[in-house]
Amino acid sequence: MSPLVYGLLFVVVAPLFGGLLAGVDRIVSARMQGRVGPPLLQPFYDVGKLFEKETRQVNPVVEPLLLGHLGFMAAAGALVLGGTDLIFIAFVFALAALCLVLAAGSVNSPYSFAGAERELVVLLASEPFFILMLAAICKVTGESTFQGVLASPVLVALQLPGVLLAFLFVATIKLRKSPFDISTSHHPHQELVNGLTSDMSGRLLGYVELAHWYESALLCVFVLLFFNWSVTLGLLAFAIAYGLEVLVDNSTSRAKWQLVLRSTWTVTLLFTGGNVLALFLLAR
Amino acid sequence: MSHVSLFKRSPWILHYDGSSCNGCDIEVLACLTPLYDVERLGVVNTGNPKHADILLVTGSVNERNIEIIQNLHRQMPDPKVVVAVGACACSGGIFARAYNIQGGIDHVIPVDVYVPGCAARPESIIDGVVQGIAALELKHKRSA
């Protein structure tokens, strides 16, 4: 199959994957708390309901921006599988997040605005890592596309164990898991109400959820890049990583933004920078 | 237009405490614990009126919270349902004659389901929510 077909396939399959993952996440979280939890398809019911409900737009730019958020998130994944240069993906990924920040910042709600500001902080924390990660993967394999990396004889995870560890850390931000869910909260009655999504109702919230499913699928694709020898191995690694994220989510309280920024940059610098530096020194 | 709506599978709740003694609030929160686990039914306690389908009010209306209750109700997108939980929310309860109490929640916003009890038991709160879901479906069908 041509890369183009894979790209289109991502657009169709990723929401199903992300939605099921969210369903498993909620069941596993519930079991960790000694509860039964919702049905597996609950996230699909939720989003379906959101599209049935009345939508109130506080500012007319919100819907186009959120469609941009959804579109760029889907495009980022489609472009990876479509064989585009990997470094380019980091910027499309950031652009998608920026659309969400603009949408949340365009309304008057102080919670939404605080959420937008905090999302900018987590972007500042996570983006340098993603660019470094993708650059490092391209460097060790000598390839610049998804298909190229998969076909490479070098097992990326063996070359870049430090970057993989840093990825686990930074993915907590992107998966919106505690302690790094500072820009939004999936739990009620917290200081931020729902942060970014406070002022979004009906289908607007539906777009954000759908985009998050694409985001989860994209993170899974990133894990596949690390375990490029076998897709099965990659999926298994993603399952373990996601399980750890859920465990962390259920056992930590939310951090302050200063801690998020400092710790993410420290981890990025130590593990990613250290890993790349070690490879450079060994190669000399 | 007739189609199966998803409201019954995904009722999101906003809980507001009027002038409750907190007895009913504790029972509402008990519904979320492992013993009752309302998330089984897809219920989410949102804390955000713009995401909520069901407004669950405990306690009666007093002078100071009339506007707050009306505001929360206005901020909820349609279709929406109000469930009054406990004797105070239904009628003012034992505080009905207090100088600051206006009466039950239906003094300020239309109530769809009344859940009696002092405090209301978790089982009856869940039953009230389930009846609220039926009312939600009905409103959705009428508007469609």
Image (cartoon, coloured by chain):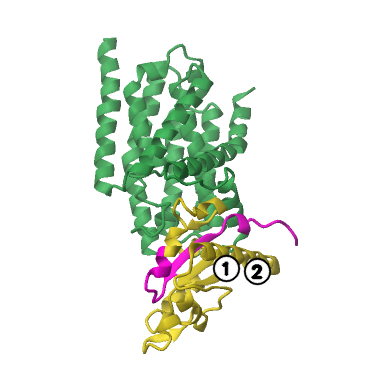
Q: Which residue lies at the image location 39% right of the left edge and 84% below the top edge?
A: B63
Report the span colored magenta: B1-26
Q: Which residue lies at the image location 34% right of the left edge and 42% below the top edge?
A: A251
Q: Chain of mark 1?
A: B
- Report the front residue among A58 and A33: A33
Q: Horizontal and vertical percent for residue A198?
A: 44, 59
- Report the front residue among B84 and A120: B84
Count of number-bearing discs: 2
Q: Horizontal and vertical percent for residue B91?
A: 49, 82
Query: What residue is disc 1 on?
Result: B80
Q: Horizontal and vertical percent for residue B138?
A: 67, 67
Horizontal placement of A80 versus A105: left or right? Answer: right
Rounded to the nearest whole Å, what is the CA distance between mark 2 and mark 1? 8 Å
Image quadrant containing the N terminus of chain B: bottom right
- Report the front residue among B107 and A204: B107
Local SS, label 1:
loop
Query: What residue is disc 2 on?
Result: B139
Earlier-in-chain disc, 2 versus 1:
1
Mark 2 vs 1: CB contact within 8 A: yes
- Write down the quadrant of residue B47 in the picture: bottom left
- Is residue A145 shown in magenta? no
Local SS, label 2:
helix
Q: Colour of chain A?
A: green
Horizontal placement of A124 versus B27: left or right? Answer: left
Q: Is residue A60 above or below residue B86?
A: above
Q: Colour of chain B?
A: yellow
